[in-house]
Amino acid sequence: MTTQWKLVCKKSDLIEGAGVAAMVNNQQVAIFYLPEATSDTKVFAISNWDPFGKANVLSRGLVAHLQGQWTVASPLYKQHFVLSTGECLEEDVKIPHWDMKLEGDNVFILES
Amino acid sequence: MNSNTPLSASKPHLVVVGNGMVGHHFVEQMIAQSGHESFQITVFGEEPHLAYDRVHLSEYFTGKGAADLAMTDGTLYDDNGVRYFTNSLVTEIDRKAKVLLLQDGQSLSYDKLVLATGSYPFVPPIPGHKRDNTFVYRTLEDLDAIRDCAKKVTRGTVVGGGLLGLEAANALKNLGLETSVVEFAPRLMPVQLDEKGGSVLKGMIEGLGVKVYTDTATQEIVDGEASFHRMNFADGTHLETDLILFSAGIRPQDALAKQSGLEMGERGGITINNHCQTSDADIYSIGECALWNNMIYGLVAPGYTMAKAAAGHLLGDTSVAFTGADMSTKLKLLGCDVGSVGDAHAKTQGCKVFVYQDEISQSYRKMVVSEDGKKLLGAVLVGDNSYYDTLLQYYLNAIDLPEQAQSLILPAMDGAPAALGVDALPATASICSCHNVSKQDISDAVCNGALSVGDVKGVTKAGTGCGGCAALLKKVVDNELLALGVEVSTDICEHFAYTRQDLFNIIKIEQIKSFDDLLKKHGKGHGCEICKPAVGSILASVWNEYVLKKEHIVLQDTNDRFLGNMQKDGTYSIVPRIPGGEITPAKLIVLGEVAKEYNLYTKITGGQRIDLFGATLPQLPEIWGKLVAAGFETGQAYGKSLRTVKSCVGSTWCRYGVDDSMTMAVDLENRYKGLRSPHKIKFAVSGCTRECAEAQSKDIGVIATEGGWNLYVCGNGGMKPRHGDLFATDLDRETLITYIDRVLMFYTKTADRLQRTSVWMDGLEGGLEYLKDVVINDKIGMCDELDKAMDYVVDTFQCEWKTTLEDPEALKTFRQFVNYDGVDENVVFVEERDQIRPATESEKQELIAKVG
Ligand SMILES: Cc1cc2nc3c(=O)[nH]c(=O)nc-3n(C[C@H](O)[C@H](O)[C@H](O)COP(=O)(O)OP(=O)(O)OC[C@H]3O[C@@H](n4cnc5c(N)ncnc54)[C@H](O)[C@@H]3O)c2cc1C
Ligand code: HEM
Ligand code: SF4
Ligand code: SF4
C-alpha cells in the first residue's frame, strides 16, 4: 500500500488552540492546530468519532495539555484522547490518528 | 395519620408515650440497634403531627412549613413495623395490670413503657391570663394562632425575658408588631447571664426597637383603651398591647406520673436513674419530663443522650448511661450574639473573674476561672460569639488555660480571636453536642474513608442538629485529613496552584484580560478543560467581553463556543430568552415558524422557556439570524450564567396576587441576563405566598408580600434539593435589587468552579448570618466593590448571538467541515408524536440496511 500526502484545507481554515472537522476519503477527521506544541509538526489529526458518546464531536472538544501530552476532552462525556496517538487516557481504547504537515499556507494529511 | 402495622403477639410490647423530639429520637435509636426486632413498638402522640423540630420552631414564621420541620413522615416507622398514633392522648397508666388508657376510651397493655411527654409552658396565674389574644409558644398550632392574631393587630408583648421569650419577641417583631418584653427579674436571661451581660443585651435589643421592661411584675390584665389589653404593673404603671405571649418558663409534663404514683421531684419532674428508669423498673422516662439528680434539662441534647441510654438499657447494653449534661448555650437573639458557658454566675468557691467590656461596639465578655487560675469554670458572652467555641472546649475538656488566660476574651489585634488549635483538643472532646459526637468519632469516621465534611456528617450525624458546630467540625475534619496525609488540595488543576477564588482576585487586582497572560504570570503548561472554561468564566464575570473574541474562543466549552447546548448526537438546542416567560403571540409564531422551517423538535422547558432541538452546527447562525431579526436575544441556556427567571402572573391578573411579580420577573431577568457565574443561576418571582413560581427552590427567589418583597437565597431543585434561606423580608424594590446584586457578585467572586449557590452556602463559613453581614451590614467593607462590579456587568451587556452574526471570523467556525459542504451522516432522526427525535443505534442500523 502506498502512502501519500493529500491537501485538506488552508491554514486559515484552522483555529489556533482548537479543532475543526474535515472530511477525508469519506471519513470524518478532527484537526487541531497548536502553535504552542514543541513537536516538529503543530497540526494533529484524530478521528472525529467519539466512541463513548457515539457521535462525531471530538473536533469540538476543549484541548487539554495533561502531564506533557496534548489531548482533547470529549464535549459529551469528557474522556481525553491523546492527539498524537489516538489513545484514550481513561479507558483502554484507541481511535484512528493521522500524520499531518503544514507547508506554507497548505495543510496536508498522510493518507494510508 | 395512623399506621397500619398489625400488633404482633409474640414479641414483648414497648409503648412510647409522647412523640416529640426526644420520643422520636428514642425510636430512631431502637431501630438503629435493631430493637424493633425484639420489641413490638407502639407510639402515642397527643399532637396532630408526628415529631417535628421544635428547636427550629420559629422558622415556621420565616418560610418553613410543617413538612420542612417534620423529623419523619412516618416512613421510618412503617418500614420498621413501628405502630404510631397521632392525636392520641394517654390519660392513665394502670401499673398493676400494665395497661394504658387513652382519651378515646381504648386501652392497651404494655410490657415496657417510655414516658417522653416533654413539658408545657408555664403561664403565671395573673388575673386575666386566660383572656382572648393570649398565647404560649410551643407547638405548630400555637404559632398558627399567633400568626392569625398578629395579622389583625399592631402591638405585641412577651411576658418573660428568658431565652424563649426573646426568641418569641423576635418572632413578633418579624410579624410586624410593635414589640415589648416584660421580665419580672431585674435583668434579661437571668439564668444564663450576669447583671452586666443582661444590661448590655437589654441595650442592644432596645436599639432594635423592642421595648424592654425588667424588674416589672404584672398584676392584672384588663381591657385596654387604645389596645385590646392593658397590663397593670405592680409599680402603678401600665402597658397597652393587643397580643400577649407568655413565656415564663416551662414545666415538666408529668401528669401521668402523678396519676400512677411514680416517684417525682418536689417541684415536678419524673425521677429517673442513670438508665432513665423511673421508680417502676418497667417504666422509663426521657426528655424534658424527666428529673435526673434533681435537675430538669430544658434542651434537646441531654434528651437525646437519655434516649440513647434508655434504648441501650432496654436492649441489655448498660454501658451507655445518662450522667448529666452540660447546659452551655450560644444563641443569636434578635440578631444579638449571646453565649453562656458553665458557671456563668461565678458561684464556685474562690473563683476569679476576668471581664472585658466595649461600650462602643456593644460587647461584653466574662471568664470565670478556678482559684489557681488554671481552669475555666464558666463564661458569659454578649455581642460576639466568635469566642464561644474556644471557651467551651477549654471548659468541657478541663484544658489548662494558657499563661495569659485573659487573651481568650480580649479582641486579638489582627481581628480574629485567639482560637484553640483543634490539635489541642483531647480525643474525648465533644464536637457536636446535639448528637454527642466526639473528636475521636470524627477521627474514626475519617480513617474509615469519610474524606469530607459532608461524608463525616453522613456517618456521624455531627453538625446536623442545631448546626452550631459547623465551623469547628470543618476544622477537625481538615485536621484529621492532614494528619492522615491526605493532602487537602484546593488547586483547580495542574496548571494553576490556586483556588477559583484566588484566580478571581488575581484577575481583578492585576487587571488580567486573557488566559495566556494569566498562564504566563501565574500558571504553568498550556491549560486544560478544567482551567480554561473556569478562567474564561471569570474573565467574563469581571470584564464581560465577548466570549468568542479570538483570545477567548479556545477557552470555551463546546456549548459556549457555539452558543448552544450540545445534545447526545452532536446537534444543538436553541433557547431564546423570553424574560419572565412572557411572550407576545407574534413572537410565539416566529418561534413556531422557525421550528417548522428547520424541523426542530420543540419542547417547553421547566423554566418556562421554549427549547428547539436538533439544529446542526451550520444551521445555528441561520436560525439565530432569523430569531435576532424578530427581536429575540440569546437565552444563554448554554452558559454558566442566569438561565431563567420563572414567574407567576401576579397581581396584574391573579386574584390573589399582592404585587406585580410579572414586571419584577422581567426586570430582574433583563438586569442579570449578562452575568457569567461559577455555575448556572435560576430565579423565580411569585406574586404572593401561594408561591406558584416555586421561588423557594431557586438560587434567588422573590415573593411578594403585603409589605414589599421577601428575598430567598441559595435554594435548589435538581439533584440535591435545598430550600432557599429567607434572607430579608418586606424589601422595597431598590433594596431588593441591591441585595440581589451583592449576593450574586459575592457568590461569583467566592464560589468554586461549578458550585451552585446551594452548595456554596452550605460551605460558607458563618453561613446565612455571615452573608447577611456582608451584604446588609457591609461587615467586610465590600459592598461598594460588589455594587460597582455588578453595575459594570449590567452596563456592558451584549447579545452574544447578535455580535456573532456580525463577525465573519466567528461565523467561520460554524462550518460542519472545513473542506466539504455535506452533512454529518451520523445525525439521523426518526419521528415520534409528530416530531423528530435522534434515532437509536439499532434504528440507525435498520435505516442503513434499508438504504443499502
Ligand atoms: C421555640 C423553642 C425554641 C427552642 N430552642 C432550643 C434550642 O435552641 N436548643 C435546645 O436545645 N432546645 C431548644 N428548645 C427546647 C427543645 O425544643 C426541647 O428541649 C425538646 O423539644 C424536648 O423534647 P421532648 O421530646 O422531651 O419534649 P416535647 O418536644 O415537648 O415532646 C413531648 C410530646 O409528648 C406529647 N405528650 C405529652 N403528654 C402526652 C400524653 N399523655 N399522651 C400522648 N402524648 C403526650 C406532647 O404533646 C409532645 O408532642 C426550644 C423549644 C422551643 C419551644
Ligand atoms: C410574671 C412572672 C414572671 C415572668 C413572666 C418570668 C419570666 C421568666 C422567663 C421567661 C424565664 C426563662 C425560662 C427560659 O429559660 O426559657 C424565667 C426564669 C427565671 N426567672 Fe422569671 N419570671 C417570672 C417570675 C419570676 C420570679 C418570681 C423570679 C424570682 C424572684 C424570677 C427569676 C427567675 C429565675 C431564677 C429563673 C430561672 C428558673 C429556671 O431555672 O427555670 N422570675 N422567668
Ligand atoms: S403565587 Fe400568588 S399571585 Fe402568583 S399565581 Fe400563585 S396565587 Fe397568584
Ligand atoms: S434530568 Fe437528566 S435526562 Fe433530564 S434533562 Fe436533566 S440531565 Fe438530562
Image (cartoon, coloured by chain):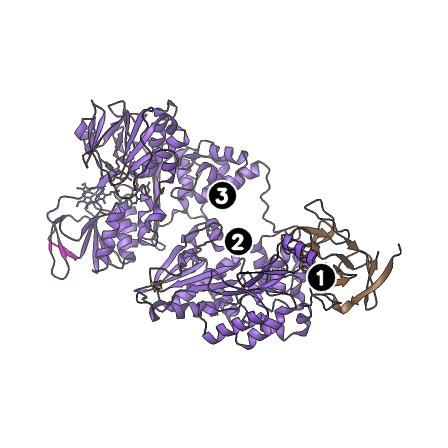
Chain colours: A brown, B purple
Q: Is residue B143 magenta?
A: no
What's the residue at 17%, 30% (across, down)? B259
The residue nearer to you, when weighing B620 against B349, is: B620
**How far across and how far down the image is residue A56, in percent?**
68, 58
Mark 3 and mark 2 in contact? Answer it, CB < 8 Å. Answer: no
Image quadrant holding the N terminus of chain A, namely bottom right
Residue at the spot of label 2: B755
Graded by Cα atoms within 10 Å as few (under 14), some (14 to 19) or many (20 or more), the crowding at tag 1 reads some
Look at the numbered disc 2 and say if its residue's Cβ is closer than 8 Å to ligand 4.
no
Graded by Cα atoms within 10 Å as few (under 14), some (14 to 19) or many (20 or more), the crowding at tag 2 reads some
Image quadrant holding the C terminus of chain A, namely bottom right
Residue B190 horizontal side relative to residue B664, left or right: left
Q: Is residue B236 magenta?
A: yes
Look at the numbered disc 3 and say if its residue's Cβ is closer than 8 Å to ligand 4.
no
Graded by Cα atoms within 10 Å as few (under 14), some (14 to 19) or many (20 or more), the crowding at tag 3 reads some
Residue range of the region highlighted in magenta in the rendering: B220-241
- For ligand 1, give the image quadrant: top left
